[in-house]
Amino acid sequence: MRVSSSKPAWNQSPADYLAGRPAVHTLPKTPLSRYVTMRDGCRLAVDVHLPDGDAATPRPALLLFTPYYRRFALAAGSTAEPNPNTGKFRDFFVPRGYAVVIIDVRGTGASFGTRDGFRSPAERLDSAEVADWVIGQPWSSGIVGATGISYLGAASDFLASTGHPAVKAIAPLFSVWDTYSDNYYPGGLQCASLTQTYDRLMFGLDQDRRDLLKEFKYYADPDFRGPQPVDEDEDGTLLAAALAEHAGNFRQTEFMADLRYREEGLPYDPAYSSASFSPYTYAAGVKSDVAVLSVSGWMDGAGYANGAIARFLNLKDNPRHLLLGPWDHGARIDVSPWRADETPVFPWMAEVLRFFDTYLMGADTGLKDEAPIHFYALHEEAWHAADQWPPYGADLVLAGSESGTLSATAVEGTRSYRVDPNLGTGHETRYERIAGHDSRNYYCDWQGRTARMLSWDSAPLLAPLDLAGHARLDLRFRLDAPDAALFVYLTEVEADGTERYVTEGLLRALHRAEATPPAGQATAWPWRTFRRADAQPVVPGEQMSVRIPLLPTGWQLKAGSRLRLSIAGADADHFGKVPHGRPPVITVDLAGTRLHLPARDIAGRLPTGTDDRAGAQLSEALGAIQAASGATVATALAYRGDRAVRIATSHAAFPVGAAKRFADAPAMAQMKAEGASQLFDGAAALERMFGDWSAIAALGCDAVLNLPVRAGDGRLVGQINLLGPTGAFSGADLAVLTGLAKAAAAAFTPLDTGAEAA
């Protein structure tokens, strides 16, 4: 089995599991809090939350290592949540029998020390020493797990990689595997917006700068009073000393600029590179009996879903589980345009609970009998189970044309595009939440953005198309510059013309060379080193080929929708300009360019036999008919069973892909029955025969001329509709126009044949 679709995705759903696992313990108002001293004398602030406050009963412990304060101090009398980053784990797991231990990593919160870099190797060693301390406490059963979102999730990886014998399970949530390519330099391009915003957040936290923290919703509560001192620091003297040490912490903007090439060390410390703070580096240290649950969402930053998938693929000897949902970073928002509610209704924390109950509590939860992978399909709005990744075996291959169509037939030719350096994707994207911005409606302003890109559209789909995994663009192209940023987007254009962002991929042309991934870095997509030694400046004018993986998704395109492929050379809202200076021209060689889609089934999805020659004939014929008739608007409708679908148009008010049923369209039904040209002149005639007469009138059109389109064997396969002002077609030469319509028949026949076959 690859994918389960005809039965529920779970034998026991997470909601049902949670219903049988109620909270039976109380959560004390305040935790135990103290310093734990590390090997070098650095003291870490630790909070311990115990069920019922019981420090005598041994329990499994969940560890969360955070740079975002284990707990805020609050103004007197405040009822604010002091744990905006980790409170959900405290509230969920302590009442269900777990000890939850939250640690300020060194150089943050109330802990001492100075951070010399992002997620420094010193923190990894600290995590094992904290685990040593935990298992020595009377409330510990000697069994340890770790979890957390983002930074905290990678810290879970680091703890497991120390090989600590007490660690039995980790759940890295919404976290990276390769910090370089999953987060800061996706495709070798620096996500400048992330670096700058995250720097302000961390500087505000590390220096207790509340004037900066108010920019971030999660940390903006006016009752926050900086990090909470530990119990022994009654007068805050130790906290003040710790904050003084934080003054030497690294700055994110300068630090990441020094790591432009993957695994290249800092100028002053060659051993400290992006590998130093990436979990893949230490994967060999994870013992094979450590269970791993990876969780991410389809809009989880620049590549966190890649991180979850890579962790699943590389820790193949471990008990492993993978959950990919309709979420942003941290699952704060359900990102689906068709969501029932902004807040996710799926209880993903219940799946984390079931995981830890299985591997830390030793409970028979039935989890081991479930499929190892569960993923959500957007637009279908359904969960699926799978045994392997990628889950689907079909590869739908499409090619673009000079006229902008996307079909299964490859053609010769080129299309060129000068990069628009001001083009952006807005500020409701996958990139905002990872920097702490409170995004709510993902890609709500995507409509029309691809108009400034180089795009190709498929014909309307005849049946739903299910995608899951990484789409890939095999691009043959040339540049007139030594480098470029390549952005690739997929959009679902619904039958009513609504444009839905699906996913994207990006690559700096300098990093086009592929390589075989070493141990610990296996992927299901083309892999690159992103190293300086492998970077290849482009020879202007020289043709080259690259494979650009798009970020993974689960998505169902609906029947009647079109798939749009778009290429751009800038996202000014999130990435720096490449190259400096004059924007390059990208020239695509169509014969060597293919879009690969990871599909469940491709049979009958697209009209059979449609190719660019037919599309070009249709475009040419429609233009000729419009010119000869003087029509204001010209559209083409192809017949499919009980309806007709618009396959070409000259006006956005009548979008391609829209469908009409013959039963609802008297004029169209008459055309199909009689097969003769029709002329309707005047508002009264239009109102009587056309359900959309008001849309026609809104364009200043009160006359309609419909022309039949017949295949070579005489079959009626569709019609061409011409709209104009009153009297526009009274003197029209129907013989000439009908002859021109016949030239477009090749574009109609495949659609009609495909519909019959479907």
Image (cartoon, grey):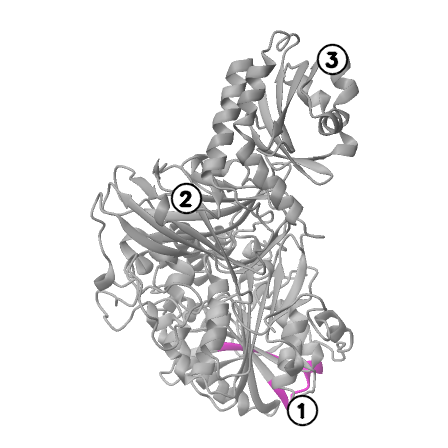
Residue 570, x across and y down, in percent: 38, 43
Residue 352, x across and y down, in percent: 63, 74
As helix, strand or loop, the secondary structure at mark 1 comes to loop
As helix, strand or loop, the secondary structure at mark 2 comes to strand
User: Does 91 sit above or below residue 502?
Assistant: below
State which quarter of the image contains the N terminus.
Answer: bottom right
Q: Amino acid at mark 1?
A: Thr
Gap between marks 1 and 2 measured at Cα: 60 Å
Q: Name the N-terminal-most of marks 1 and 3.
A: 1
Between residues 118 and 575, which one lies in front from this camera angle? 575
As helix, strand or loop, the secondary structure at mark 3 comes to helix
Gap between marks 2 and 3 measured at Cα: 43 Å
Q: Amino acid at mark 2?
A: Ile
Pointer 2 residue: 567
Gap between marks 1 and 3 measured at Cα: 84 Å
Between residues 724 and 369, which one lies in front from this camera angle? 724
Q: Amino acid at mark 3?
A: Ala
Image-based side of 55 in relation to 526, left or right: right
Number of the front mark, 2 or 3 = 3
Pointer 3 residue: 683
Residue 102, x across and y down, in percent: 55, 75
Between residues 531 and 265, which one lies in front from this camera angle? 531
Q: Are marks 1 and 2 in contact (CB under 8 Å)?
A: no
Give the residues in magenta.
45-60
Number of the front mark, 1 or 3 = 3
Residue 396 visible in the picture: yes
Q: Residue at x 59, y 63 (%)?
A: 84
Pointer 1 residue: 57
Magenta span contains residue 48 = yes
User: Does 564 sit above or below residue 727?
Assistant: below
